[in-house]
Amino acid sequence: MSRHTGPKCKLCRRIGEKLFLKGARCQTAKCPVEKRNRPPGVHRWRRGRPTAYGVRMREKQKCKRWYGLNEAQFRRFFALASSFPGNTGEYMLSLLERRLNNILKVTGLAWSRAQARQLIRHRNIEVNGRKVDIPSYLVDEGDVVRPVPEDKVLTLVRQNREQQGHPSPSWLDVNDADLTVRVARMPTREDVSITVNETLIVEICSR
């Protein structure tokens, strides 16, 4: 499946805010958003005010890049959210938060969703005692996520969590002794880690 292999920091500069795509580097003064907080490209050309379509497209692109999705993946999640009654935007964000690679990121077991994706693809993560190699795997209430019991994997995951200050979202229970994560409940809109206007995303995806 296709994925972005170009400079990730340009994606953050285009959006105009940190998307934390480079892990630890985003927390330092070396972050290009800190050094050059302007869009990439020809800077002398004066950009006009964005159109209504441009504003909605920017929100969608921010959401895609935050969770590390391509267009086809994003459309599938939107179609799935649209098939359920209720607020489509909120349900879509809840689905994206339940992705396995996002679980590793928000609990600090991985520095970034890209690193989480690599851990999962290399079969270093278990869900309910079974190895899972699909980063988009959706966890359910009561599921238990943990790294495989291998010294090098456990050391890496423990270092990641300690260096990030032991983050623990309210809908996830993290046990630092054995580095397990239990899904206590389904995430709500207040648990979503990205600042985005989901209404604008629904408007542009519904065209």
Image (spheres, grey):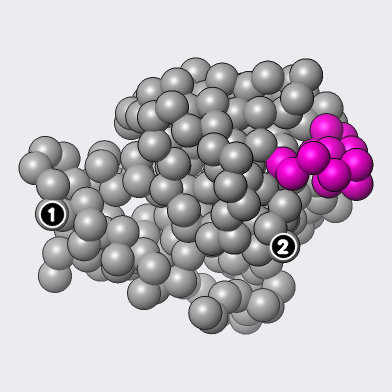
Placement of the C terminus among the 4 image quadrants: bottom left
Query: In this view, which residue lies farthest toward the left?
Result: 85
Whether residue 94 is situated above or below residue 74 in the rendered picture = above
Residue 197 among those drawn in magenta: no
Q: Judge by depth and name the residue closer to the eye, 58 or 100.
A: 100
Q: Assign the magenta stretch its main secondary structure.
A: helix
- Residue labelled with disc 2: 122
- Label number found at residue 40: none
Number of callouts: 2
Whether residue 6 is situated above or below residue 138 in the rendered picture = below
Q: Position of residue 7 (x, y in %)?
A: 71, 73
What is the C-alpha distance between the residues marked 2 and 1?
Answer: 32 Å
Could you say which quadrant of the image residue 156 lies in? Answer: top right
Can residue 148 be seen in this snapshot? yes
Could you say which quadrant of the image residue 166 lies in? Answer: top right
Q: Are marks 2 and 1 in contact (CB under 8 Å)?
A: no
Nearest-to-viewer mark from 2 and 1:
2
Q: Residues within 10 Å of mark 1 (few under 14, many from 20)?
A: few
Q: Position of residue 199 (x, y in %)?
A: 22, 47
Query: In this view, which residue lies farthest toward the front?
Result: 129
Magenta span: 147-160
- Residue labelled with disc 1: 83
Callout 1: SS: loop
Q: Amino acid at mark 1?
A: Ser
Whether residue 72 is situated above or below residue 27 in the rendered picture = below
